[in-house]
Amino acid sequence: MQIWVDADACPVVIKDILYRASQRWQRSLTLVANQMLRTPPSPFIRAVQVPRGFDVADDYIVQHAAAGHLVITGDIPLASLVLAKGALVLNPRGERYTLDTIGERLALRDMMDELRGMGIDTGGPSAFSPSDRRAFGNALDQLMMTWSRTGT
């Protein structure tokens, strides 16, 4: 089992949760970003720095993620691509994306982009909160316990 993190936009508090989970569950964790990342010393944790550029980190994750892997990202198009490969996807707020829900999320994202393109202020996501952190931790623990029971 491999965990991939779209690390450029991932909140530090979520990375910290992932570091601890990787150690506790002894699962491989790879953070992918276009900048150098510091990670705790661990045989389970590594960071990959990709060149700067549009979707370079996303492309790396899509290329390397496989069925049964977990991808942590808030990027809806990336989520769609790795779901198609059979990966599991969890966003930093603890919401799990699935093949059943990703189409609606893509459509909503496209509509919001269109509205912003017309000059309409659509606001943005709410500030990351302690309840988001708890939701992520709970969702991650649930997935880890499932993997532990199934042996994958």
Image: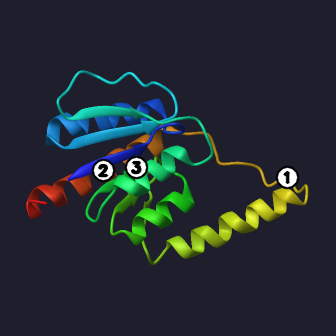
Camera-near label (3 vs 2) is 2
Q: Quadrant of residue 126?
A: top right
Q: Residues within 10 Å of mark 3 (few under 14, many from 20)?
A: some
Instruction: Residue 125: give x, y in percent of width and height.
Output: 65, 48
Q: Which SS class for mark 2?
A: helix
Q: Give the residue number, with chain letter if any, for mark 1.
A: 121
Q: Image quadrant of residue 113? A: bottom right
Whole-angstrom CA distance, mark 2 to mark 1, is 33 Å
The residue closer to the viewer here, 56 or 45, is 56
Q: Quadrant of the C terminus?
A: bottom left
Q: Which residue is mark 3?
A: 135
Q: Is residue 107 above or below residue 128?
A: below
Mark 3: amino acid? Ala
Query: Marks 3/1: CA distance?
Result: 28 Å
The kind of residue on which mark 1 rests is Asp
Residue to which mark 2 is pinned: 140
Within 10 Å of the Cα at label 1, are there few (<14), some (14-19), or many (20+) other Cα atoms?
A: few
Label 1 SS: loop
- In front here: 79 or 91? 79
Residue 27 rendering spot, x and y as whole percentages:
18, 43
Q: Tell which residue pokes out farthest to the right in this image.
A: 119
What's the residue at 48%, 61% (across, down)?
A: 79
How has the structure been colored for display?
rainbow
